[in-house]
Amino acid sequence: MTNSISSIQSENSSVLITIITVVYNNVSHIKETIQSVLLQKYTNIEYIVIDGESDDGTLEILDEFSSDISILLIEPDKGIYDALNKGISLSNGEIVGFLHSGDFYANNNVILDIANLFTNKGSEVVYGDLDYVNSNNTQSIVRSWKAGNFYKKKLKYGWMPPHPAFYAKRDLYINSGGFNLAFKIAADYDCMIRFLQQDILISYIPKVLVKMRIGGVSNKSLKNIIQKSLEDYRIMKKNKIGGVASLIWKNLSKLKQFYKK
């Protein structure tokens, strides 16, 4: 790589964007995630990595890239959302986004495209699409999450954008209190709903921004799927966007993600 994220910003890099990666014991894939950030053509990036005291060799990889990581925090946490909140509290960027350990950007222009919408259009939230890929063969697409344009009425049908492809002004996180730790699996859904219900400018990039390996926490077991559904229902009721019918629509809408054109 010719330019590290600490290099002098280019002419189009006017806004500082914070990218936060949370990791715990992912020695197999954390390097790919880090390199995906470092290869972005947009250079005005603050990269924060939060590690929950890994003991599988992950820390050695983080040390290898220490000069390219803006802030590295290694300490125990109360789960992924607690770690993400720590990252937000440490962030200095005007825009905040997350690239989870094992995930990677679809191309090297992703952050540049996102920055252009924030800078040129005045957006306060920008989101795009996401591909779920096979963990061992990332060229194999398992599901395609095409979010589509946002309308508030879609929230009542369980609509949500993919959180790894979701970028928002830091002030939204700070003013809303960040992720609610009462939700163990679906706090990202709750957080995005709180943002999307506000009267703010929301922009959609109609292309895949992030590749995500299958096997995430929310769907790795039947127990987690049930817990997520229960949390989704509580979130819908709390944010007054629906109930059982909305939950059913939310789950049914995922089926089309498996359809390959």
Image: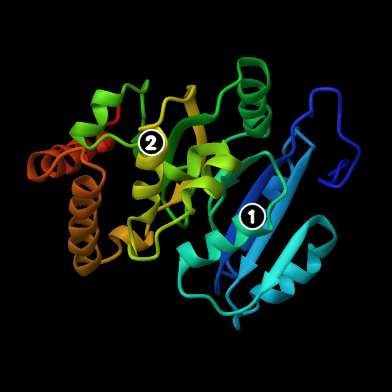
**Is 54 above or below relative to 130?**
below
- Residue 204 lies left or right of residue 229; in this view the side is right
Image point (65%, 33%), residue name? 111
**Is 136 above or below relative to 255?**
below
- Asked whether the viewer can see residue 82, the reply is yes
Give the percent coordinates (x, y) of residue 156: 20, 32
Mark 2 packing: few (<14 Cα in 10 Å), some, or many (20+)?
many
Using the image as rendered, state which of residue 259 and residue 49 is in the foreground.
49
**Is 237 above or below relative to 60?**
above
Q: Which of the 4 image quadrants contains residue 140?
A: top left
**Is 79 above or below relative to 235?**
below
Identify which amino acid the numbered label 1 is placed on: Glu
Question: How many numbered marks, from 0 up?
Answer: 2
Give the percent coordinates (x, y) of residue 69: 77, 58
- Which residue does the numbered mark 2 point to in the structure image? 161
Image point (8%, 39%), residue name? 245
Identify which amino acid the numbered label 2 is placed on: Pro
Q: Quadrant of the C terminus?
A: top left
Give the percent coordinates (x, y) of residue 46: 74, 48
Q: CA distance from mark 2 to mark 1?
A: 24 Å
Q: Residue furthest left?
A: 245
Give the percent coordinates (x, y) of residue 88: 60, 55
Image point (36%, 35%), residue name? 144
- Residue 103 lies left or right of residue 69; in this view the side is left
Q: Foreground mark, 2 or 1?
A: 2
State the SS at label 2.
Answer: loop
Image point (61%, 28%), residue name? 114
Q: Which of the 4 image quadrants contains residue 150?
A: top left
Q: Which of the 4 image quadrants contains residue 240?
A: top left
State the SS at label 1.
Answer: helix
Q: Which mark is residue 32?
A: 1
